[in-house]
Amino acid sequence: MVLMELIKTNEELVDVCKSISKEKFITIDTEFIREKTYWSKLCLIQICTHNKAIIIDPLENNIDLKPFIKILNKKTILKILHSGRQDIEIFYKMSGKIPKPIFDTQIAAMVCGFGESVGYEKLVDKILNKKIDKSSRFSNWAKRPLTKKQLKYAIGDVTHLFEIYPILKKEIEEKGRTDWLKDELKILLSENTYDVSPEKAYKRLKIRSYDIKTRAVTYQLALWREKKAQSNNIPRGRILRDDIIYELASIKPRSINDINNMRSISNGLKLKEDIKQEIIDNVLIGINLNDKDLPNLPKKRKLPYGTNSRVSLLKILLNSVSEKHDVAQKLIASTQDLEDLITDDNADIKTLKGWRYNLFGKKALEFKNGKIAIIMNDNNIELKEI
């Protein structure tokens, strides 16, 4: 039975971090709220060691988190998280560094065949055969005082994780998939993953047109919205929804009257007059941008006739390989990967590299090029040379 500590002062934090600094690995989770802000508001930090369960309250007594940040950056301590992207994003903004080394149990579970993007509750049930009370999940974590039920829920997110980690680690090592996991963790450990530069905001939007003016207006409105959301710390959707940006880029309004005549506005969407003027100003900026002023876009995909049916056949092979080797399909290939493979034997995709090529990519190419066939034999899917 681990001892739980609630840390509310700088003195307590310094002491507990001193004890944590000797650990080989710890599990970490956070509670935060983001519904009304652009940046996540950190409300709790949970940590579990071999003999302690710790909750740090960053909202109490202007607590200085520098001792905890040192733990995050201590390379002799493995930090274990589950679906840790948002947690790492918070830590990265807080300290300017990505915690290393990292072990993500959601990614590890996919490598071990527990399914795609498996949730924490499901993983605890499958591995530990324990049930979690999730009723406190959507609590107002910024409200004080916290209830005993909230604290119990919060600490459970790291105590169960501490039990799960060695089980997943052992399975990965026994299956010889340590390199698979390292490969997948590269995305979590890349600073590009957490880059929210307004100049890259257009990447969040789907390309609706390759027309230069439409693309330029889309880019400029996304840039303006991101800057405004960040500076005012409000969700980007509360400034302007994505679908409105698409409509504005298509119409390219040059006056407030043009905006008032838009379908979305006539259907009840309300925008303040100053926002409408800012939209007009940025639409005009976008219209006057040249192609050289815009980021390169991927080439428009022109899939050959019959691609969908061929992809469907490859998915049968993918599902068979996934089941046989007990690894999530998502890790091996996406639908777009399969489309690229159909159009190009030398496509620059993950599926045709490293362990994925050996596991699936080579077979997929042979199947595509008529060298092997998929057959049913005693209710099992098998590959047969032609």
Image (cartoon, helix red, strand yellow):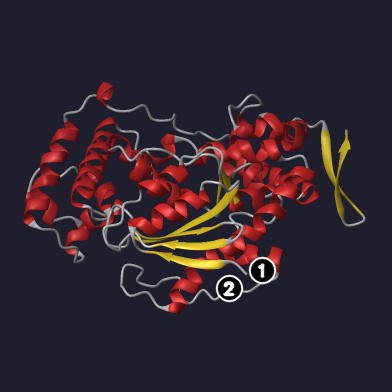
Q: Relative to the observer, which residue lies in front, 318 or 247?
A: 318
Question: What amino acid is labelled 2 in the image?
Answer: Ile
* 2 and 1 marks in contact (CB < 8 Å): yes
- For mark 1, what is the residue? 125
Q: Relative to the observer, which residue lies in front, 159 or 255?
A: 159
Q: Is residue 32 visible?
A: yes
Residue at the limit of the structure toward the top, as seen here = 292
Residue 159 placement, left or right of 87: right
User: Percent from the top left, x then y, of residue 29?
Assistant: 48, 57
Residue placed at 75% from the left, 30% from the top? 369
Residue placed at 62% from the left, 47% from the top? 330
Find residue 39 and name its label. none
User: Percent from the top left, x then y, of residue 140?
Assistant: 35, 71
Q: Relative to the observer, which residue lies in front, 147 or 83?
A: 147
When asked about the image quadrant of residue 215, the answer is top left
Q: Quadrant of the C terminus?
A: top right
Question: What amino acid is labelled 1 in the image?
Answer: Asp
Q: Quadrant of the N terminus?
A: bottom right
Vertical position of residue 183 compared to residue 347: above or below: below
Q: Is residue 305 visible?
A: no
When asked about the image quadrant of residue 36, the answer is bottom left
Find residue 132 and name its label. 2
Residue placed at 48% from the left, 62% from the top? 54
Label 1: how many Cα within 10 Å (few below 14, some 14–19, many 20+) = few
Vertical position of residue 230 compared to residue 237: above or below: above
Please tell me how many numbered marks the rendered image carries. 2
Question: Could you tell which of marks 2 and 1 lies nearer the N-terminus?
Answer: 1
Vertical position of residue 311 compared to residue 105: above or below: above
Judged from the image, the secondary structure of the residue bearing numbered disc 2 is loop
User: Percent from the top left, x then y, of residue 163?
Assistant: 66, 60
